[in-house]
């Protein structure tokens, strides 16, 4: 199995083109199930998760074709056509590997009238139940049964518009309700909706397909159901988690990096934390420029929260930065239980981190030392890559498949700005 080798200590300089957002792309692909006409998605990231979603959709009878983009900065183009849905069954094997595949449930149900989709089951970052998804579908008149680890959902006739008030913010459940509502009979009001930019991206694509949605970017989405949706061409938003990760790379390694395609409003919470830590982030014509002139970052206090708060998907990366900061940082994780698996691995590099419940206290050390490490989820893996950029000597990150799930050609992007990083075989 491939590994990533990083030799730390190089400052970064140059530009990094961002890819399309994984967490938007996967849901947009699922949305192709809502129409018999083709949905063509541009700016698609080249990721294992995208390929896996493509495979899953093919098992439902969706014709999926991909045209590869020329360079790092040019996304792939994917055409998806769900002319006839020939199967509405997503196996445990599929959903277990990639939780986002659960997002096929609502579009299958809304268009096809029934679906059998595996429950995602336990996962490396906590229990992650899907109760809110199922309650939303039930509120819209679906019959939902659980048997042998599967969700069996059906509706006689169209789903019905409903008033759904989520007890807490869930990205996935908001997307489930939104996709289901587009083809429902009547109006659906989704209260306490997630406001993550990927939700607005999905809503914009659905609108291009003929859906009637208002309230984008607010905690209340209102959907007037329509009889059918049609095909559309849509370009996926750029990946804000990738942007944030490379912004932190510039901060931990030092130097100056332009993030081409980055948008300030999508990572505002991170930018203010990076500024407190001593970096500067300025707008450029094509994105954002992150500079770190200070020798050492300063410690920060951060709590993860739903958008526009500090994203849980950047928590591990920020912790890597805080490992080499001057002073003591406090990082509180409020979205997922058990999302500190990177802590013991960062400790192998010499970090000083104490975890109590959902709080990590990070005492900055003068230097990290390279070592072989591995991680069990995608954001945790990339935090080890970032720590490796700052560590003395060689860091070997094992289990690279986690990185390949969510970071498009990471080693090429980082070596392009001067990092000493390479993918090596066993
Ligand atoms: C999505 C993102 C993930 C990100 C997360 C939070 C994708 C593919 N993944 O995950 O990268 O970290 O948003 O920004 O887009 N919950 C329930 N019941 C439910 C649904 C969720 O209890 O029915 C809980 C979860 O266990 C978690 C919290 O709600 O503690 C938030 O989860 P949610 O926002 O749904 O995350 P995902 O959509 O799974």
Image (spheres, helix red, strand yellow):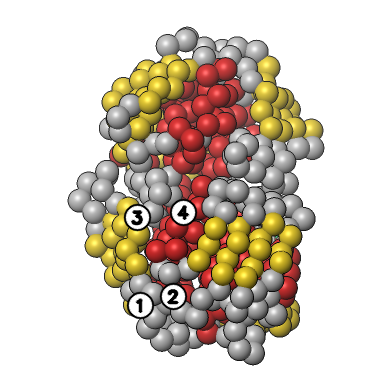
Instruction: Confirm if mark 2 falls within 8 A of ligand 1.
Output: no
Look at 49% across and 85% down and name the residue there.
87
**N-terminal-most mark, 3 or 4:** 4
**N-terminal-most mark, 4 or 1:** 1
**N-terminal-most mark, 3 or 1:** 1
Mark number displayed over residue 235 = 3
User: Is 309 or 419 nearer to us in this picture?
Assistant: 309
**N-terminal-most mark, 2 or 1:** 1
Mark 3, Cα crowd under 10 Å, few <14 / some 14-19 / many 20+, is some
Residue 317, placed above or below residue 235: above
Kindly indicate whether the residue at mark 1 contacts the one at mark 2 (C-beta within 8 angstroms): yes
Q: 118 left or right of 205?
A: right
Can residue 357 be seen here?
yes
**N-terminal-most mark, 4 or 2:** 4
Look at 60% across and 29% down and name the residue there.
319
The image quadrant where one finds ligand 1 is bottom right
Going by the picture, which residue comes out furthest to the right? Answer: 357
Mark number displayed over residue 229 = 2
Residue 29, placed above or below residue 345: below
Picture coordinates of residue 219 (x, y %)?
Answer: 64, 50
User: Is 396 or 105 nearer to us in this picture?
Assistant: 105
Q: Which residue is under mark 1?
A: 37
Mark 1 lies on a secondary structure that is loop
Kindly indicate whether the residue at mark 1 contacts the one at mark 4 (C-beta within 8 angstroms): no
Kindly indicate whether the residue at mark 4 contacts the one at mark 3 (C-beta within 8 angstroms): no
Mark 2 lies on a secondary structure that is loop
Mark number displayed over residue 201 = 4
Distance between the alpha carbons at the discs numbered 3 and 4: 9 Å
Distance between the alpha carbons at the discs numbered 3 and 1: 17 Å
**N-terminal-most mark, 2 or 3:** 2
Mark 4, Cα crowd under 10 Å, few <14 / some 14-19 / many 20+, is many
């Amino acid at each position: 199995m491939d590994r990533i080798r990083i030799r730390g200590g190089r400052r970064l300089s140059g530009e990094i083109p961002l890819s399309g957002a994984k967490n938007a792309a996967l849901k947009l692909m699922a949305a192709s199930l809502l129409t018999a006409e083709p949905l063509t998605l541009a700016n698609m990231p080249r990721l294992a998760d995208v390929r896996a979603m493509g495979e899953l959709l093919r098992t439902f009878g969706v014709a999926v074709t991909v045209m590869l983009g020329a360079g790092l900065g040019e996304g792939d183009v994917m055409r998806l056509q769900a002319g006839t849905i020939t199967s509405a069954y997503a196996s445990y094997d599929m959903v277990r590997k990639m939780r986002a595949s659960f997002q096929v449930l609502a579009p299958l149900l809304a268009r096809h009238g029934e679906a059998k989709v595996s429950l995602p089951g336990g996962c490396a970052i906590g229990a992650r139940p899907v109760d809110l998804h199922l309650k939303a579908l039930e509120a819209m008149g679906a019959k939902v049964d659980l048997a042998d680890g599967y969700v069996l959902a059906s509706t006689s006739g169209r789903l019905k518009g409903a008033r759904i008030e989520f007890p807490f913010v869930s990205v996935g459940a908001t997307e489930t309700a939104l996709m289901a509502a587009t083809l429902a009979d009547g109006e659906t009001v989704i209260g306490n909706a997630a406001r993550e930019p990927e939700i607005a991206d999905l809503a914009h694509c659905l609108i291009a397909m003929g859906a009637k949605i208002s309230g984008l970017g607010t905690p209340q989405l209102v959907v007037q159901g329509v009889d059918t949706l049609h095909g559309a061409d849509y370009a996926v938003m750029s990946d804000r988690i990738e942007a944030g990760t490379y912004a932190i790379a510039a901060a931990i390694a030092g130097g100056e990096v332009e993030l081409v395609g980055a948008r300030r409003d999508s990572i505002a919470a991170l930018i203010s934390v990076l500024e407190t830590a001593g970096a500067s982030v300025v707008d450029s014509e094509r994105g954002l420029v992150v500079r770190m002139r200070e020798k050492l970052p300063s410690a920060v206090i951060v709590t993860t929260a739903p958008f526009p708060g500090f994203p849980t998907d950047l928590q591990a990366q920020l912790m890597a930065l805080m490992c080499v900061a001057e002073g003591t940082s406090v990082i509180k994780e409020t979205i997922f239980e058990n999302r500190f698996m990177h802590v013991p691995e960062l400790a192998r590099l010499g970090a000083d981190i104490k975890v109590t419940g959902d709080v990590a206290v990070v005492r900055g050390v003068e230097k990290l030392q390279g070592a072989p490490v591995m991680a069990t989820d995608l954001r945790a893996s990339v935090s080890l890559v970032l720590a490796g950029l700052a560590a003395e000597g060689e860091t070997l990150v094992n289990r690279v498949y986690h990185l390949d799930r969510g970071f498009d050609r990471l080693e090429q992007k980082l070596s392009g700005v001067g990092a000493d990083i390479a993918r090596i075989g066993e």
